[in-house]
Image (cartoon, rainbow, N blue to C red):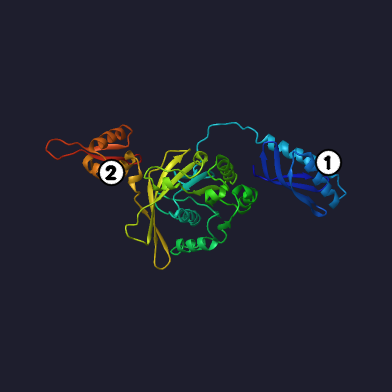
Amino acid sequence: MGSAVWIVFNDRDITLEFSRITEHRETLHTEVTVVSQATGEVGWTRLNVLASRTRADFARQLTETDPSQDWVALLEQACKALVRHLRAGQPPVPLVSAAPPEERWLVPGLIPRSEVSVLFADGGSGKSLLALALAVAGISGHALTDRWRVHDIQRALYLDWESDLATHAGRLHGLTYYREQPPERSLLYRQLHRPLTDHADELQAIVAREGIDMVVCDSLAPACGPEPEGADAAVRTMMAFRSLAPATILVLAHVSKQAAESTGKARPFGSVFVQNLARSTIEARRQESGGDDGELVLSLYHRKCNIGRLAHASAIAFGFEADGGITIREERADAARLALPEQILECLSGQKLSVSTIAEETGASASTVRSTLARLENRGKVVRLSVASGGRGKETEWGRVDTKRGSE
């Protein structure tokens, strides 16, 4: 459940803090800390607030420390107040029509603000480097590429279950070698070893206290804890991510061995609820370097979006220079992993082509390309730019429709 609750008795200068609240069947467990303004901390324990025996045992401990208070009555009132608060939840509010806010996106069309997005790829693909680069770009106010423009953020928090501070410091050195360093304390780092749900309360406090705009969670499986593929672990963890809003949450995840070896669409490893509860998911695939060991090219495929249409495939190339700097440039996505309609649209990006040329580039038959082009034409995605008229070897050329400028 997560968030801490404070019960304050002003007339007695007593405060009870209930944190790490978890409810399961007939139990409601919480860590409770009792503080007196006069004497400081009076007691601390892990408590099942629904069990009268554990409440009575804790009241006796408190009485031994400070016999001036009626701890049985205070603890009874506080536990009842906690249960009523949790049962009540948030009151319903009117649902009225409203235009989406202008700053709806952290990365336009790909990563929505104040929501949970998942970037998933096979291990060693470069997703951690990309996530850190996005945070740096948002803080520094520069674009990674024309497609990956990160709107301004003031402060980011990197939560790391996989690596260490030195590794990310080295990546940051490369990413900022040719650019300015981020302002002091604009990029915070926290190494974690236990499941996210164990840290939910303290992380919520950090996000609020530090004014965090973006949280990177690296990565999902260790954040879930034992049995990360289970529905229970996935749902609890995804809800814990949501509790860090209004920060934008970017969760890094792996894929199964089978998905990594497949050429088709993949999904994040684990329960289907990871895909279902994320508002946007992006699959990253590492392209073959073509013999250039100093470059990492990531093709990025938008697989799910709850608040808009899917973005076209894109790619980012990271160049690892001899002087230690990292360059970033836009690349063309590997179209072989796209469905045929998407492959055709990628082929027609910025150029006009005939059916035979498209068939050669995609590996599909000419008849399949023609029928796919007809469907795309009906959807307003492509347009005939010239029509063959007489003479052998002449073919109709096709172009991609740009909704902003007409046909390309």
The answer to which of 60 and 181 lies nearer the viewer is 60
Q: Seen in the image, is 302 located left or right of residue 250? A: left
The answer to which of 162 and 176 lies nearer the viewer is 162
Vertical arrangement, residue 59 with respect to residue 92, above or below: below
Q: Which residue matches tag 1? A: 73
Vertical arrangement, residue 285 with respect to residue 383, above or below: below
Q: Seen in the image, is 331 located left or right of residue 216? A: left
The answer to which of 26 and 192 lies nearer the viewer is 26
The N terminus is located in which quarter? top right
How many other residues sit within 10 Å of disc 2, few (<14), some (14-19) or many (≥20)? some
Where is residue 146 drawn, in percent x and y? 39, 51
The answer to which of 15 and 55 lies nearer the viewer is 55
- Kindly give the residue lying farthest to the left in the view shown: 391
| Numbered tag placed on residue 362 in the rendering | 2
- Tell me which corner region of the image, top left, top right, bottom left or bottom right, holds residue 81: top right
Q: Amino acid at mark 1?
A: Ala
How many other residues sit within 10 Å of disc 1, few (<14), some (14-19) or many (≥20)? few
Where is residue 231 drawn, in percent x and y? 55, 40
Q: Seen in the image, is 360 located left or right of residue 103? A: left
